[in-house]
Amino acid sequence: DVRHGPILYLEDVSVSFDGFRAINNLNLTIDDGELRCIIGPNGAGKTTMMDIITGKTRPDKGQVWFGSKHNLLRLSEPEIASLGIGRKFQKPTVFEELTVIENLELAMAADKRVLPTLTARLSPAQRDRIHEVVALIGLRSAAHELAGILSHGQKQWLEIGMLLMQRPRLLLVDEPVAGMTEQEMELTAELLTKLAGKGKQSVVVVEHDMGFVRSIARKVTVLHQGSVLAEGTMDQVSNDPRVVEVYLGE
Ligand code: ADP
């Protein structure tokens, strides 16, 4: 049961590209409701790790479990997504010619062709969910604006909101604050912190901005050469001599 024990479990996972081991005996456990940051120098394997979790890349060996029931290596990419694993890529991809609300409505619909008639057909529960998410992502006052006129930060929050419409159990977020202002970064930290929790989502964030990581993370995993180099609080890992060495070498 996903509600007890880890929500995500990678054991001894390896993958090579043309003989180069991008992921090398990686072990990672994410607890239910946890907010985890993954850091590591360029080429450490962070993107490949996310690709393995979502089924985009298949490991050569190892185990990947979602809760205790779902062996992700047996499932296709869409099947993994439908279990409740949502991924937010670095670049926001919202529908600029639609309003904030319409973007969320579209994200809720399984069939993307229904938009013209969708608004009229939403159930009260679906409307409630949309308004709950609009408030959560801080876009209530922009709810009827076109997504195209939103700031970069607001677009990123809208895309997180779109993922939330499917009520994911696990959100994978790739460099959420790249290109954001200080104030947008603070709001993003608040949002991600609010999203994580038991009975809500587990959130895994890959991020380069150390100040941001320090502001949100309870636990940080440092990847290096496809394996876990260190794990702990930001203070613990940033004082680890092996971590310092890897970052100085960049
Ligand atoms: P990070 O996201 O931490 O910067 P990546 O996961 O993108 O690291 O890459 C890890 C290593 O694997 C890098 O050396 C990269 O060049 C290599 N790599 C990633 N994807 C591929 C691929 N499809 N083909 C060949 N090499 C790849």
Image: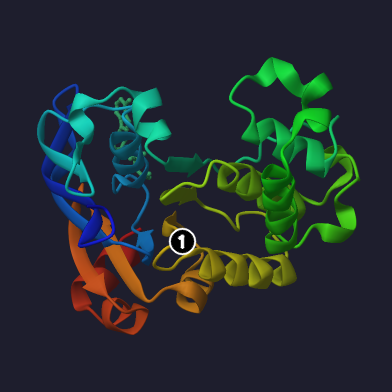
Residue in the picture at 65% in, 73% down: 186
Q: Which quadrant does ligand 1 occupy?
A: top left
Asked if 108 appears above or below 171 in the picture, the reply is above
Circle 1 SS class: loop
Q: Nearer the viewer, residue 194 or 154?
A: 194
Under mark 1, the amino acid is Lys
Residue in the picture at 33% in, 58% down: 40
Q: Residues within 10 Å of mark 1 (few under 14, many from 20)?
A: some
Q: Badge 1 is on which residue? A: 200
Taking the image as shown, residue 96 lies to the left or right of residue 169, namely right
Q: Quadrant of the C terminus?
A: bottom left
Taking the image as shown, residue 21 lies to the left or right of residue 39, namely left
Asked if 75 appears above or below 87 in the picture, the reply is above
Choose top left, top right, bottom left or bottom right for residue 202. bottom left
Residue 127: horizontal and vertical position, in percent? 74, 46
Residue in the picture at 21% in, 77% down: 241
Q: Nearer the viewer, residue 240 or 105?
A: 105
Residue 204: horizontal and vertical position, in percent? 40, 56
Residue 86: horizontal and vertical position, in percent? 46, 42
Q: Residue furthest top?
A: 113
Mark 1 Cβ and ligand 1 under 8 Å apart: no
Q: How is the image coloured?
A: rainbow
Residue in the picture at 19% in, 58% down: 228
Residue 54: horizontal and vertical position, in percent? 35, 35
Q: Residue furthest front?
A: 124
Q: Nearer the viewer, residue 217 or 107?
A: 107
